[in-house]
Image: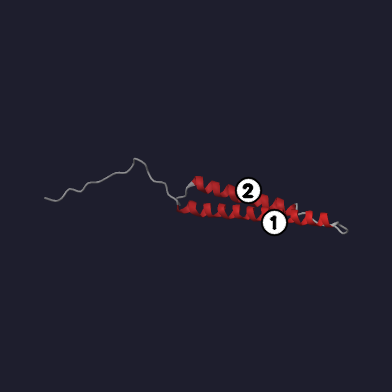
Amino acid sequence: MLIDKKIFTAGIAMVVVGVIIVVNLNATMPVGQTGMSEEEIVDLLTKQQENQDMTTLAGILIGVGFLLILISFGARRKNKGNIKKEEKKPAS
């Protein structure tokens, strides 16, 4: 099967990095405690929203990487200079 190896490896790298980021962000989700002040609650909600936004961006990175992997199976390089032109002579 013909694949473009550069696009394929870039796609694999993007998927791997995206998965690592998602796992790391999910492991470090900020958690609240009982008896927090209003300022601490607002700070906690802000950090949770930032974490969720970064998880969304990592998911987009995984999606783009997956698309690159799929594109690599259809991409074919053109041969430069190896084009042979055949001229057909009319039968006389």
- Element marked by disc 2: helix
Residue 15 marker:
none
At label 1, which amino acid type do we have?
Gln
- Element marked by disc 1: helix
Q: Residue furthest bottom?
A: 34
Residue ID for mark 2? 17
Task: Tell me residue 34's x, y (percent).
Answer: 87, 59
Q: CA distance from mark 2 to mark 1?
A: 17 Å
* Crowd tier of the residue under label 2, counting other residues whose Cα lies within 10 Å: few below 14, some 14–19, many 20 or above: some
Which residue is painted at 36% across and 41% down in the image?
A: 80
Q: Residue furthest top?
A: 81
Task: Tell me residue 26's x, y (percent).
Answer: 72, 54
Dot 2 or dot 1: first in sequence order is 2
Task: Tell me residue 88's x, y (percent).
Answer: 20, 48
Q: Nearer the viewer, residue 23 or 28?
A: 28
For residue 19, side relative to residue 8 (left or right): right
Which residue is painted at 71% across and 52% down in the image?
A: 25
In the picture, residue 85 is in which quadrant?
top left
For residue 56, side relative to residue 9 (left or right): right
At label 2, which amino acid type do we have?
Val
Task: Tell me residue 24's x, y (percent).
Answer: 71, 50
Residue ID for mark 1? 52
In the picture, residue 32 is in which quadrant?
bottom right
Q: Nearer the viewer, residue 61 or 9?
A: 61
User: How many numbered discs, if any?
Assistant: 2
